Amino acid sequence: MKILLIGSGGREHALAWAITASPLCDQLICAPGNAGIAELAECVPVGIENIDGLVKLAVERKVDFVVVGPEGPLVEGVADQLRDKGFKVFGPSQLAAQLEGSKGFTKDICAKYNIPTGAYGKFTALQPALDYLHKQGAPIVVKADGLAAGKGVTVAMNVAEAEAALRACFDGQFGQAGAKVVIEEFLDGEEASFFALCDGTHAVALAAAQDHKRVGDGDTGPNTGGMGSYSPAPVLDETMAARVMREIIHPTLRGMAQEGCKFQGVLFAGLMIGKDGPKLIEYNVRFGDPECQSLMLRLKSDLLTALIASADGALKDFDLRWRDDCAITVVMAANGYPGDYQKNTEIKGLDQAATVPGVTIFHAGTKRGGDGRLLANGGRVLNISALGHDINEARARAYEAINRIDWPEGFCRRDIGWRALAARK
Ligand code: AMP
Ligand code: GLY
């Protein structure tokens, strides 16, 4: 099969790694890809925001299957446009992608289909939002309705902070994404990411993972796209996973079908596991980054077969096998991230690092210089992923590899996996 993969991050490198390992994959094309993906696939410089260009590429290259990595093109309807042209696609329709594209849409689905989540109000103007806030008090959470590159959520510990967040939304700080606002009950507990492969009707649980969103050790400093991940997540054992499928994933699939927007693709539930069990914080309609990197290391089954079964509506009785091992992913980012950072700094030592047993390196923001040197080309730059018998071994291997990487302009967190380690004690 000839496959087109859309995206350019560490998630897509991990997907490319798993797809090209499948006997079904004859050729992989990636748009736009990165320097790591270029070792596995032909990279074509069409950006993920160029929906017409992506569709044109699929037509010109007569691909057999398209896998969409990031949420942006899904929310813009790339899957529908490709399906209209007769392509088989892994990824939800534009209507179904509203589960990530509109927080208010998701909250309404939860309310209508009895899916456990925090109490909420939806607003399109400041005054009624302020009135609701003053009635509820703090702590409370303010969310821009649309996609805001991970910056649209404020967990406010007091009313003044929440007021400021509301004003920022309605002043247009998040553009259209903030024209509608959701105010949500603050949920207490431990966060975990749960992934389920869906074919519109059936769902197969993937594995659970946890990520570290804050930039600094000890989960301090500003939020990022994710500085590391590990799988499995101790807080989401088999019993809890079964409960999440029963109480959250299956009702969502049934609800989406009833609403006329069947969900096909990977459903990524951001959960808060609290005293009363799991509650939904938010949905994403794609694999998590860097959760995907850890999941792919643990997946024993053929990923491509699973993605095709999802696109074909054939997940009934589908089974996936996983390694019992633990996987960890440590993100290396450019100094300064998530603020301003330098580009085009040289990275050396990856070959040495990759020889540490159990280690696989996935690229995110990298490119090749004209002279073949490997250069940093983004905020999150490398993912050092490792398998081990337990979280301790996986973690030691990842950091051993990092110690061999020569990139003075980059940094990483030194405590990825601390929660899983604490759970073992
Ligand atoms: P998001 O940008 O939607 O991923 O949200 C960022 C983070 O805000 C989440 O990972 C949670 O840590 C936190 N958060 C979002 N909603 C809530 C909530 N209702 N209660 C507590 N924390 C929340
Ligand atoms: N790591 C969180 C995300 O992909 O949204």
Image: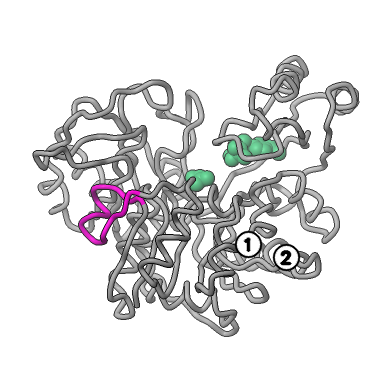
In the image, taking residue 236 as reference, residue 9 lies left or right, namely left
* Residue 171 quadrant: top right
Q: How is the image coloured?
A: one colour
Most foreground residue, 388 or 87? 87
Give percent across and percent down for residue 215.
Answer: 43, 29
The residue pinned by badge 2 equals 261
Above or below: residue 219 compared with residue 84: above
**Which residue shows up at 86% across the image and 28% down it?**
136
In the image, taking residue 75 as reference, residue 169 lies left or right, namely right
**Which residue shows up at 31% across the image and 66% down it?**
28
* Residue 178 quadrant: top right
Give percent across and percent down for residue 343.
Answer: 27, 27
* Element assignment for label 2: loop
Above or below: residue 7 compared with residue 261: above
The magenta segment: 32-45
The residue pinned by badge 1 equals 93
Give percent across and percent down for residue 382.
Answer: 29, 42
Mark linked to residue 263: none
